Amino acid sequence: MDSSWICVTCGVQFTPAPRPPARCPVCEDGRQYVGRGGQRWTTLEALRAEHRNRFEEEEPGLTGIGTEPSFAIGQRALLVRTPEGNLLWDCVTLLDDDTVRAVRELGGLAAVAISHPHYYSSMVEWGRAFGAPVHLHEADRRWVMRPDPALRFWSGDSLALFGGLRLLRLGGHFPGATVCLWPGGAGGSGALLAGDVLQVVPDRRYVSFMYSYPNLVPLPASVVARIASRVAGLRFDRIHGAWWGRVVERDGRAAVARSAERYLAALSSQADELELD
Ligand SMILES: [Zn+2]
Ligand SMILES: [Zn+2]
């Protein structure tokens, strides 16, 4: 019988097959890693036996959905409610009956949109379960491990969805790395759903910008400067990162500007900025 194999390290689901794939290209890429002990696989059935999804309101109109115990990269997805329908921003691998019921109670999904390949997870299952298109940037198409008619590839730097939601390609971490601008967030001041394209760090006055987070490989200064100038033109106050608790509550735009400035100083000869000597 065919199983839809899931990589244990990145949580990405592959096209159903009788046997697991030989390798996971997402984990063999320099931005990720193959886990200790080599490539391992699981299935959605096995995952359902040992994990549950936790739902928690992040702010009015925004619900976090994360898997417990934590699985693979450990991100939590965000369900954004607008008067014109709900968006699932980013995704988690586990989809079970309880999750489908809870999402339906919140109004179902009009669409799914994902920041970058590390959160592709079991997006096809989610798209099919809710009859929702899954929006991915075409620049990252080669990282799709389970092609499906539910996947919609967009191009360019911006895609308007519904309810004022807008996808913006910032690049950096991946060529198609995308954030989502939610004008209704933060009580109408606007919120940026950043995935880890802008990574909200433990000091929540800052974000960071990396090529690889697990392997600590930075992005070039020119790319960080470009991302910062793009973000400076957006209207938002709050930044929701990819994990529970990773939120810049207010003044998010200033936090991005401050973070880019610090990052660029660290990459240049301005050592005094960091009090290194
Ligand atoms: Zn993987
Ligand atoms: Zn990532």
Image (cartoon, rainbow, N blue to C red):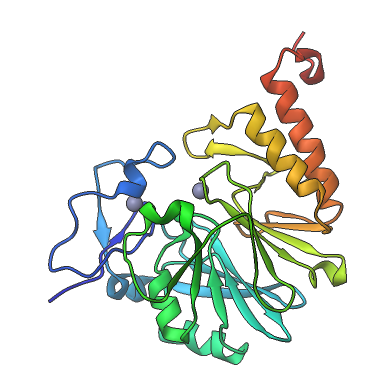
In screen coordinates, is 116 left or right of 240?
A: left
In screen coordinates, is 82 left or right of 51?
A: right
Residue 65's place in the image compared with 142, above or below, is below
Which quadrant is home to the N terminus? Answer: bottom left
* In the foreground, 165 or 126: 165
Which residue is rendered at x = 72% and y = 12% of the image?
269
Which quadrant is home to the C terminus? Answer: top right
* In the foreground, 200 or 163: 163
Residue 202, located in which quarter of the rendered image? Answer: top right
Indicate the position of residue 185 as horizontal and vertical percent values.
79, 69
Which residue is rendered at x = 36% and y = 71% of the image?
50
- Determine if residue 206 is in view: no
- Determine if residue 53 is in view: yes
Residue 149's place in the image compared with 218, above or below, is below
Indicate the position of residue 166 as horizontal and vertical percent values.
69, 66
In screen coordinates, is 197 left or right of 225?
A: left
Which residue is rendered at x = 36% and y = 52% of the image?
142
In screen coordinates, is 162 left or right of 118?
A: right
Indicate the position of residue 27 as horizontal and vertical percent values.
35, 46
Q: Residue furthest front?
A: 156
Indicate the position of residue 31 as horizontal and vertical percent values.
44, 40
Which residue is rendered at x = 44% and y = 61% of the image?
120
